[in-house]
Image (spheres, grey):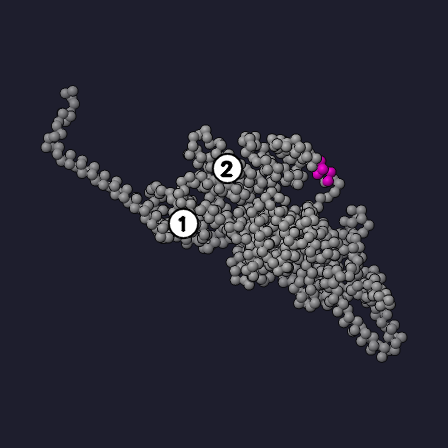
Amino acid sequence: MEEMSDALFEDEGDDDYAWAKAASVMGAQAMSATRAAENRDSLSAVDQLRAAVEKGNYAAAGRLIHELHDVGTHIPPSELYAGPLLSLLKDSYAREHPLRQHTTSVTDAFSAWFALLPDAEHVQDPTLLSLEEVRRHIFQTNIVNTDLVLTFGLAAARKGYAEQVSSQLMHFAMGAFPDVQAALRYMNKFLEAAEEHRRGLQPQNAVFRPALSIRRKVYKTALRALVRNGHHDVAVDLLTQKKRKLGQAVPKETLQFVAAQLQKARRYDLLAKVNPLLEGSEDKALAHEQRQVDVEAAYLQEIVDKRSGAAADDDALVNGSLASRLSHLRRAFSHGGTPPTCATLVNFMDQYYDSGRCRALRLLRQRALRNGTAATTAYTFAQMVFLRRRKMDTLLIQSFASTFYLSGVPREPILRILQTAPSKPIDSADVATFVPAAREVRKKAWPDSLTTALVWHSVTALTVGWQAVSALYHQLLAFAAGDASSDSVEGTVGERIPALMPRPAIRTEAFMPFVRRLMLGTGLEWGPRILEDMLRLGIAPTIYHFTDMAGVYARKNEVERVMMIVDMVEGAALKEAREKGEAQPAAKAVDAAVQAGRSDAGSETSRGSSAVIGSHSIASEAAQEASRLDEIPLNVSAHQPRKAGALPGADLIFYICVIRGFIIARNLEGALAIEERMWRHYDYQPGNPYYESYFEDLRRMQEHSRRRQQAVRQKWVAKYGPELAQEKVDVAIKERSERVRKLYGLTDAEALNSVHYGPHGLGKVRKDSQADSA
């Protein structure tokens, strides 16, 4: 103890230590004052942030939140911060937005402000925080930011909003990833985030039951989206896995939907795995027996008969007054009902709109939008067909952008059209009838390839200048080749917004508007070039592509090229007829669609593709130049494409288009010769609008030619006498018919008939003669 320092036993009360005590007290007071000052500064910064948000001073708010995050200051959540969040979303791609000044991307800025919102259980003033408004600005915008959507989904789940956003989010996510496995991984992350929030609210053993409803909604939406997108194997794997682990987490209606879609796709191997999962339903024995019968019947039907792919509607939807048909259409769009066929909807829209009324169309559209994705897509597609037929292309683009994600379509031209749409002289009643408001669309749908093909038609029609059309065509080629960079959109200050992936495949119909437009605008070489591009990409041209190309060649009086195409497509029709065991390539009759005209245009043509072909007036060359054959397929179901390299067969529309082209070129000889080749396969029917559409001009041209020939004959009679003049006329007719026979591939009788009689053929002349005699 003696070795220990004596200082241990000194008295602190001695005066020698007074200075040390004073210094210690002063230091403690100073530290306490510093901490208090820091706390006051921290609180004042948060108050300043709230004040800036309340005043709408978002530049100061953006700076303050950045500084507070840097020093790690906790900011109490509040519904107040929904204001700057919505402001950011309304102009999310403006790099100069005050809320983006201190962040590298809009996703980072969104995450910072969304984190300040209260959890779902702690919202005190719902009027300040409307998650529906946030969702609308994220999902239902023309330029959808995939990263922002996916970030929003996970952030919302962590705050307890999973059940509110799950349906729309999963519908988007299942189509937003090029790899479907990446979409499933995101779905699992979303569920984990939702369960993480649940664990913070209740004991561990009570997590499963409250989260069951969320999982049920997620799996229901994901399974339906996977099946619609064609990922049948992945959907069944997910279905069997989740059904085994979670018992009844997948609703019975979803199981039935998946089974029905697999049966339509003829995936009977997968259907055998799904059928046992339905055994838990109340009517399992009867349902199972019925499904086995359906599968067997489908196998037999596939072998015996070729399914048309388009269901027939009840007579109540097709016939009757407009009022009764409207009533049945409304019931068809009831919850869980099967939507009417596209042909039925377009036919009703035509007749109702022509009656001068619009209100029922608006109400029918609203009813369809309220009853799920299938009803929404069925009605919107039919409406797009209706608008395209009437050349109301701006309304078509507006309707598409309001209902579908801009995937598989050229986004920059569409955005320009949407920006200029309000300035166009469009009737406001039409806008209200065909373009849904943002709040009407509960969730946007992913378009299929046939829907996007219609959009390409309208965008091409609204594009001015052959250079712009050529650029649009090259973008279509990039789409078909799978080049995603061609669909990026430039933001306000040069920021590129990536394309939505994956895009629907480009169909052969998307190339149709470019053939005629580019051949007439830039050069005839574009026709073969487009067909070559299609074959290179594995896309088979249809008879409509050859129709447009042959029609343009006829307009330019390129007889040899026209006849080359005519020989090719007629040979293809003959080959097809031989393969089917038919006696001739086409019946000597006109299809029902051609006989009935525009209202029944859903019938199939000789190639089996549905078409809508409006009647056109060709009373003048200007009208001829403006009119065209707009073939808009009405069949919603995707048909099997023709094998690349196989030629399509000629149909009635092909011949009429070539005849029109020769009329425009003032080539009466060519028009009559092609007509003779048409009579080989089709009979003349008086009053048919397709024949009458060109007969008037052809009669006028032939009458003018006969008057000229009569004048020449009179000169020959005056000069050579009647007998010698008649000999010269006979020689001239023989020479002319011989030239026509060789040039247009006619028989001797056909060549002589075209030279002598013209637009109705010999049979029509004989009928007229008999009528005159009577």
Q: Which mark is residue 214?
A: 2
447 w.r.t. 693: above or below: above
Q: Is residue 470 something one can see in this rendering?
A: no
Q: Position of residue 183 (x, y in %)?
A: 53, 40
Residue at the image position 54 percent from the left and 62 percent from the top: 424
Q: Quadrant of residue 337?
A: top right
Residue closest to the eye, 504 or 357: 357
Magenta stretch encompasses residue 554: no
| Residue topped by disc 1 | 83
Q: Main secondary structure of the magenta part?
A: helix
570 sits left or right of 445 in the view: right
Assess disc 2: are there few (<14), some (14-19) or many (≥20) residues with their C-alpha within 10 Å of its C-alpha.
many
Assess disc 1: are there few (<14), some (14-19) or many (≥20) residues with their C-alpha within 10 Å of its C-alpha.
some
The quadrant of the rendering that contains the C terminus is bottom right
664 w.r.t. 404: above or below: below
Residue at the image position 42 percent from the left and 51 percent from the top: 87
Question: Mark 2 and mark 1: span between their CA atoms?
Answer: 28 Å
Which element is circle 2 on? helix
Q: Which mark is residue 341?
A: none
| Start-end of magenta stretch | 296-301
